[in-house]
């Protein structure tokens, strides 16, 4: 099987996306060791080759993308929230171009391990056209599958779990460290309205170590590094900025630098998942549907981005340590097997 990855955010600097891709590649090696995987990205392809040896990466010009699709058996939109366009239509427009190439070249489109970030995304005509062209869509949570089916955008949607669980199951992060508290703050180009209340609530727990954890290594507006830089100087010196990722490094080494904290407050989806495997007590800030879904499936307290101090304190107190979510890894493995079986039937010997 020759698979072409149609999403182009790998290697951009978001550790969560790479964890998800690593989970898929692990499952693929088990299902079909000889499978070939290609992708096209606008980022550092040499770093991606080092991180994911055996996967071939091309540039983003139309000729390279067309050649990659022409040579594949299956186009695969893998992971992320590909239909979101509240901030920009860059990804939706990219999917429309990919869908046109797949139609021209007669290649089947599939989506695996994706999420719907907001219900209104599915009302967009371009999104609906791409979904209707897909032979099947496997989502990372039940709510996304329900939205796809109820909207009529796709009747071929099934629910499972995020594919990062497949990597974390075999390569868990370091165990949570008593007395450490961590924040993973991302608000998609905006501010954190409840920042002061949340940080005061964490301070009231009297942590021995306070970690400002950056899942995203780029200095994007509203992301971890920018929000850290916006802290008052006297507060900033109390927090330790930690960015575990090193572009091109093996994910096993990167994950070994994950500062497992006893308590983690996060508005990042994959930080919540990773912390659950570390045995942290997790509180999720629900800035979108995927985070609200993560809180539900992980059994963690959920607060709003503007939560007042008393609400944050109650959430921190009620957060519990749960067993490693191995059931979600099992669900992710099953959905990879379902997709592989369906895609294999479409390949002409």
Image (cartoon, rainbow, N blue to C red):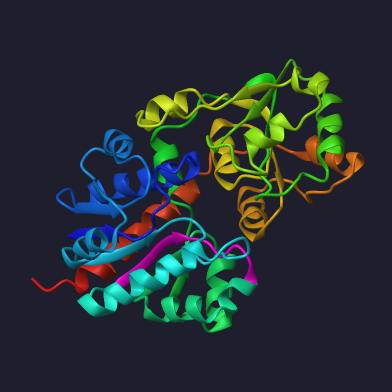
Is 115 magenta? The answer is yes
Q: How many labels does the image show?
A: 0
Question: Against 256, is 109 above or below?
Answer: below
User: Is residue 322 part of the magenta span, yes or no?
Assistant: no
Rendered image quadrant of residue 60:
bottom left
Query: Where, by quadrant of the figure, is residue 134 drawn?
Result: bottom left
Residue 1 screen position, x and y as percent: 17, 60
Looking at the image, residue 293 lies above or below residue 255 = below
Along the line of sight, which residue is nearer the eye, 67 or 193? Answer: 67
In the image, is residue 79 above or below residue 264? below
Q: In this view, does 17 lie to the left or right of 273?
A: left
Q: Nearest the camera: 223 or 120?
A: 223
Q: Residue at x 41, y 68 (%)?
A: 95
The image quadrant where one finds the C terminus is bottom left
Q: Where is residue 36 in the image (x, y as percent from the top left)?
A: 18, 52
Above or below: residue 214 compared with residue 58? above
304 vs 274, left or right, is right
Residue in the image at 49% along x and 42% along y: 14
Front position in the image: 247 or 122: 247
Query: Is 283 left or right of 278, judged from the image as shown?
Result: right
* Residue located farthest toward the left when viewing the structure as drawn: 349
Q: Which residue is drawn at 51% across and 24% down?
A: 174
Q: Give the range drawn in magenta.
A: 109-119
- Residue 321 visible? The answer is no
Q: Position of residue 202 (x, y in %)?
A: 80, 29
């Amino acid at each position: 099987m020759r698979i072409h990855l149609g999403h182009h955010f790998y290697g951009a600097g978001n550790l969560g996306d790479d964890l998800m891709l690593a989970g898929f590649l692990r499952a693929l090696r088990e299902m079909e060791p000889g499978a070939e995987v290609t992708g096209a990205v606008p980022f550092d392809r040499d770093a991606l080759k080092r991180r994911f040896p055996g996967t071939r990466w091309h540039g983003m010009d139309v000729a390279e993308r067309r050649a990659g699709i022409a040579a594949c058996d299956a186009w695969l939109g893998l992971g992320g929230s590909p239909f979101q366009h509240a901030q920009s239509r860059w990804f939706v427009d990219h999917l429309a171009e990919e869908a046109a190439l797949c139609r021209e070249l007669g290649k089947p489109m599939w989506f695996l391990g994706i999420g719907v970030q907001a219900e209104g995304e599915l009302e967009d005509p371009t999104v609906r056209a791409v979904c209707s062209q897909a032979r099947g869509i496997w989502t990372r949570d039940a709510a996304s599958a329900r939205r796809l089916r109820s909207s009529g955008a796709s009747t071929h949607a099934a629910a499972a779990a995020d594919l990062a669980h497949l990597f974390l199951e075999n390569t868990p992060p370091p165990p949570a460290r008593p007395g450490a508290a961590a924040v993973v703050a991302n608000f998609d180009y905006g501010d954190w309205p409840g920042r002061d209340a949340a940080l005061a609530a964490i301070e009231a727990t009297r942590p021995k170590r306070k970690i400002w954890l950056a899942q995203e290594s780029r200095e994007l507006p509203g992301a971890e590094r920018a929000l850290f830089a916006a802290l008052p100087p006297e507060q900033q010196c109390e927090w330790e900025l930690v960015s575990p990722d090193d572009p091109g490094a093996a994910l096993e080494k990167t994950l070994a630098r994950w500062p497992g904290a006893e308590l983690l407050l996060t508005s990042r989806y994959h930080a919540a998942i990773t912390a659950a495997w570390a045995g942290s007590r997790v509180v999720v800030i629900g800035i979108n549907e995927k985070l609200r879904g993560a809180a539900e499936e992980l059994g963690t307290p959920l607060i709003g981005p503007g939560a007042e101090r008393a609400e944050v304190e109650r959430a921190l107190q009620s957060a519990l340590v749960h067993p490693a979510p191995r059931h979600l890894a099992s669900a992710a493995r099953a959905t990879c097997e379902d997709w592989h079986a369906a895609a294999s039937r479409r390949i002409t010997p």
